[in-house]
Image (tube, rainbow, N blue to C red):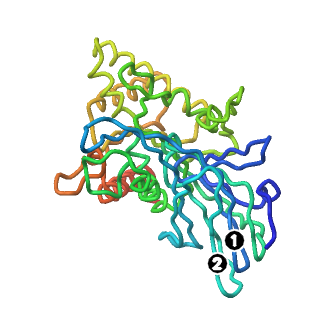
Amino acid sequence: MKKIEIKDIVNIIHRLGRTYQDTETGILYFNWTCSGLELIFRGTCLIASLYAQSGVEAEREVVSGNMEERTIWPWVSVFLDEEEVPYRRFEISKAKDTQLIFQSETEETHRIRIVKITENLKGGLGIDHFFVDGEILPRINRPGRRKIEFIGDSITCGFGNETKEKDRLFYSAEENGWLSHAAIAARMLNMDWDMICVSGICLGKRDVIPLPYAMNELYFYTDRILEDRLEKNVYREWDFTSNASDYVVLNLGTNDATGIIGAVDPEQEERKFHGEYYGFLKMLREYNGPDTRIICALGSMDYYLYHHIVEVVTEYRNDTGDGRITCFRYPKIDFMDPLGACAHPHVITHEKMAKALVEYIKMLEGNTV
């Protein structure tokens, strides 16, 4: 088998989502949900050399009731050609690992997608090189393909969407971003997509939410979470011009509501949220340009701040004349449907959310999608 460094083929593969190539090591990191890479492979065997960064989760010990820590690792799905069911799915459970990506007895040619299906803050993932029996061919260009970007929290990540045990805490094996409403909707719309999402995140910092980041501290960088892990001194800004989105779907406010309700002065925190949301909209428009449609959404777990979001969007539209920013309310979880971990949406609910969003986008485009 021959060894192919990722840095030597980075120009002939297709990156999925926001990826980050370390200029010092050459490792290509794909940490965000559903980020990864796509390549054309011809041969009999493809093996990847992967670098992983673990995360830590709290767990209540059954007998003592004490909170204990456990290590969690990222999960990956591999897809062949146009298939939506993974050819392989595996966990990276150590810092440096090799994984079989594809194997056959006879030479075959396939479009292979390697996709991280767990979220960024719960563990990182990068690729250094491949071992191949065969060759990696230049990617096939797909001119004119549209893109949709999703900004969100655990709901967008697909937190616990593959379990029906609503009282479970976070387990990597039960979070599948590929089966989140965002990824499902993007595939239904035949669009490429990015997912910038972190479980527990708020739009702005909330004193009672002990997360190290707020979305208004992350969104405009390629991967600030990774750069903090790697102890970089300068954050790399995301290239919005080269990665223009036709749609941006913003689904934040669920965790902000928790922070507001638990605050000493909830009314003051609501006013703060109003200002932060307005400022974030302003920056979304500035970075994404005038043509991107921005959908300010909420759901499907909590709608406490939805009327505030509508007020902010109305105010922003009146101030700017920007008619390409609208509001959308995801359908609430059906009480007849199963619940995922921590009462999050199960895959069944994600499918309903995706269909509702697709219908809304069809309406915006005059049923021409």
Q: Report if residue 293 is visible in the image.
A: no
Residue lying at 34% horizontally and 39% vertically, measured from the top left: 298
**Where on the picture, by quarter, is residue 82?**
bottom right
At x 24% / y 43%, what residue is drawn? Answer: 63
Dot 1 crowding, Cα within 10 Å, few <14, some 14–19, many 20+: many
Give the residue at mark 2: 103
Q: Is residue 330 left or right of residue 202?
A: left
Measuring 35% from the left and 16% from the top, which residue is drawn there?
A: 271
Q: Residue furthest bottom?
A: 106
In the figure, residue 3 lies in which quadrant? bottom right
- Disc nearer the start of the sequence (2/1): 1
Q: Position of residue 216 (x, y in %)?
A: 51, 27
Q: Residue at x 56, y 68 (%)?
A: 79
Q: How many marks?
A: 2
Task: Please give the label number shown on residue 46.
Answer: 1
x then y, percent, for residue 304: 26, 31
Compared across the picture, whether 356 is left or right of 123 comes to left
Q: What's the residue type where badge 2 is placed?
A: Gln
Q: Amino acid at mark 1?
A: Leu
SS class of the residue under badge 2? Answer: strand
| Element class at badge 1 | strand
Q: Nearer the viewer, residue 95 or 340?
A: 95
